[in-house]
Image: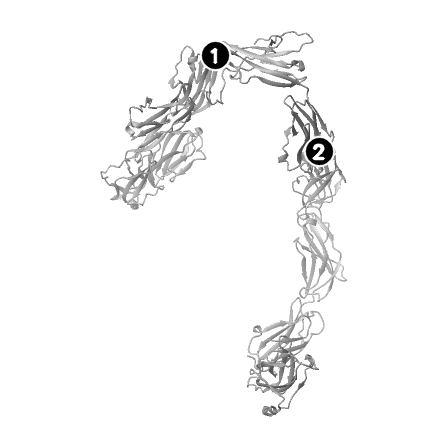
Amino acid sequence: MFIFIYLLPSNHKLIQCYNNTEYYHKKSFKYQIISNRTYSEEFGPVFIQEPDDGIFSLDSDDKKVIMNCEARGNPVPTYSWLINGTVVDTEADFRYSLIAGNLIIHNASEAIDYGRYQCRAENSIGTVLSRDALLQFAYLGAFSGRARGAVSVREGQGVVLMCAPPPHSPEIIYSWVFNELPSFVAEDSRRFISQETGNLYISKVQPSDVGSYVCQVKNTVTNARVLSPPTPLALKTDGVMGEYEPKIEAHFPQTVLAAKGVTVRLECFALGNPVPTITWRKMSGNIPKKARLRKSQAVLEIPNIQLEDSGSYECKAENTRGGTAFRGHLQVYTLPQWISMINDTQLDSGEQLHWECRATGKPRPTYRWLRNGEPLNSQSRVEMVNGELIIHRLQQADSGMYQCIAENKYGAIYSSAELKILASAPMFSTNPFRLIATVGKDVSLECRPRASPKPRISWRKNDRRVQIMLLRNNTLRIINSSRSDEGSYVCRAENQFGSAELTTVLLVKEPMRVELSPIRVEVTVGESVVLSCKVTHDPSLDVSFLWLLNNQPLNTQQEGGHFEYIQTQSSTADMMIRSILLKHAGKYGCRAQTRADSVLAEWWHLFPGPPGPPGVVIVEEITDTTATLSWSHGVDNHSPITTYNVQARSPVSLGWQTVKTDPEPVTGNMESAMAVDLNPWVEYEFRVVATNGIGTGDPSASSRVVRTKEAVPSVAPVNVRGGNGRRHELVISWEPVSEEFQNGEGFGYIVAFRANGTRGWKEKMVTSADSTTYKYRDETFPPLTPFEVRVGVYNNKGDGPFSEVVTVFSAEGEPREPPSEVQAFAISSSEIKVMWKPPNPGPGRPQGYEVSSWKDMEQEEMGKKKRTKGNETTMLLTGLDGNTQYLISVKGFNNVGQGPASSPIKISTKKNAPSLPPGNLMWIQEGNNVSLSWDPVKARDNESEVIGYKVLLRQEGRGHSQVMRTPNSAVVLTLPEGGTYIIEVRAVSEGGEGAASTQVRVLTSSGKRSLYGFSDLKMCTYGSSLKPLSKWHRSPSLLFAIVASS
């Protein structure tokens, strides 16, 4: 590169021109990747689809094989195919045809068409070969029809039944049928089917094995199945085989080759008596953890085999008679894989090409090169060493399609690229070009022609040659531009193939200025503000605005409605921020842009808010009542932190509670404090909340859970009381001390008591922290003895305080005497009234009584018991049987127990009430007076005698009844006017009321209201003998009616 420097007079500007040493279409190391092709650009063939390995079933109805191939290129490629390196003549052989790039083989046969195929695509640029694809044919022949001889062995002897599979391709799966389908041989530690040989191995024959065996094979592609002729297995009769050491009959090969990533299965099975046990090991290292043992350990299966799984493996067969082993080597290979590939390259003629392709693989790959599908050989200008290709002094004839092939014995991979030798006159993509700059700014005028070889460059302005310049990269640079620099600048490029010019029109405008307001914003979180951006610019230029926050474009649509862009004038843009959040603080920028320049103005806006959470709280030291805490400052959100509030939570607290601290208060510049007045032996976790002038922020994360140290209890039980209990018992109770105040492990209670007037205290330990009661029994003290009682606390650290002394009385005991003067009276056939007097006053006072009643012929336990509600001394027994003798006793009870029962007394219930109702009801109505009569009721022998009757009267539609009693079988009723009344009659006896008569309805006439209300009915009774009803009929003024209700 040559640099020309000219000294300028002081009144001249410096103009720099940068001369290209490389061109944009070439990389600095002499070639460039051309990734984006225009539609009209010519390029060589590039494969889109290459043929794949395939297996064709000969049993297919359609005897047609299709090998796929497709490539893109301009011009459109043409295709041909090779089989095993020989060109397929699709014109001469009617069995072959081409559709696009696809090869179609009609009436395919294994003898002719088996082999490796390659697709060749070519156009005017060059030729490429695809990877090769192996075409195989799937078939499964039939077993030989020749009968198989019987196999005879002794019981206990091992046997191998040969499958001898028919011709087939590709792999097959073996199974054995026992006697007949679908009874298949089940594999176990004694029987094994090798998927390598197909043979059936029985390590120790048993009588149950005798039968016919058929080998079945299945093609993995076609799923076709064939069966062998049966092989009979029989037992010899000359004795049983004795025990013998194992002999391995089925094993994996001495060397196993496996491709990386596949699943490897190693077989090992032995004959022997007893049945041998198979074990596996890797000679160097451990068997891979992913390995699995199958078929009673006869198969070692290693999935996804890797290089590190290579090595020697050993299987060992052992029984009580001995052991044997087999060892083989597993070798893992890998197909070649690219590390670096070649890429399309454009170079000038005469330059040097340097391509390198590298691949990995095991064995290590070798390399060869193709040009336009043909092998490339080393020549005077061509060097090929270990995947490198160097061509010196490139010529036009070197253009074309190149392929690097990396291969080992397990496969090959292809990398293709196009080499284009350039030879063209200079050409510019745009012409002319307009550039707008601002006063005082530096201006760069670029000149980047496409040309090969590189052209000579010159500049001129307004048709005058620019002579004062600094040549570098062909760029003309104007320092500190002004209006005088405006004009047309022409870049001229020329080489041996031609020349071209690019005209750039330069306009110089006044620079733009931006004014921001307000400069300082004093708003807090939750308030709103408007930021304004105003520009002064050349009126001929349009201006656009872009708002930024922390150097990122501000998207108002994604900010939840907090931001709104407002532009009321072409030169002003406002940004409104509503309901400001803490996260809205930061560096705001307004970028104003015209075609000439772009100006960014920025200013910081801090929106104060409540502080953020302090850092994690650490418990530095813990005692029985204090915890020393430390934390780190959180963000103050632009308002200084004034105080910290320390909070604690324990299992017995109601959420987080503020605790006392030392010092108090904790100021905002502190990062530690001591929580005081904590309870001993309580689990706490702590957190800290910061406050500033705006408010209180979120709490810190909580500390780890810590427990304060133990201390002597400081809280005594409360509500000490007593009483109740059995005779000679002193019952003492209290409210338990909550866990929060137990202050340590081993918490319990000390119960102290002494009889009034005595000096020494008796103390008893209650070890359960949940206990609320203590009972002390002493036969020597009488009931209701007064005691002085107090209850204290203790734990492993020592004894705590006692409660205040209270007086508690010993138990009264259960009642000691039965009630006296027990009497009973029969009320009816189902009721007995019992009366008694309480026992003499003294200890064991009853709180109630229990009355027992049972029939004369029953046990007391079968009777009924009924208790009074309090200290009542009477009780009505109901629900009894009529005309029955009962025994009745009474006993007192209290909350301690029951006292003795009184001596039973006998009492009989009255006979049952008459079962027949009054019959033949008749009445005469005169006005509101009704004369009613009925036939007397006669009691049966087992029923009580009738002593009178009960008349029930109620107005229809109402539930209340008026009751009248009479010893006779007739009655006169006076009814109110207006209404329907229902009347019924019942017989009354010592045994109770009898059955009700038929209901009668009486209708009174409307008119003058009766002088008597419904509650003032008058009753008049006749003598014991009724007058004949016929005499009553003589009065013509009487209305006679009988209405019987159903």
Task: Out of 943 and 256, give the one closest to the viewer.
Answer: 943
Q: Residue at x 29, y 30 (%)?
A: 109
Judge from the rendering whether residue 57 lies leftward or rightward of residue 652; answer left or right.
Answer: left
Q: Find residue 671 and report its horizontal and vertical position in percent.
A: 72, 35
Task: Out of 847 and 1037, give the one closest to the viewer.
Answer: 1037
Confirm whether residue 992 shows in the render: no
Image quadrant assignment for residue 523: top right
* Outermost residue to the front: 540
> What's the amino acid at mark 1?
Glu
Q: Find residue 767 and report its horizontal and vertical position in percent.
A: 66, 53
> What's the amino acid at mark 2?
Val
- Between the residue at mark 1 and the residue at mark 2, the CA separation in whole angstroms equals 63 Å
How busy is the neighbourhood of tag 1: few (under 14 within 10 Å), some, or many (20 plus)?
A: some
* Outermost residue to the left: 146
Judge from the rendering whether residue 331 lies leftward or rightward of residue 814; answer left or right.
Answer: left
* Residue at the disc numbered 1: 351
Image quadrant assignment for residue 722: bottom right
Total marks shown come to: 2
Tag 2 secondary structure: strand
Q: Please, is residue 785 above or below residue 80 in the view?
A: below
Confirm whether residue 387 shows in the render: yes
Q: Find residue 320 and report its horizontal and vertical position in percent.
A: 36, 40
Q: Which mark is residue 530?
A: 2
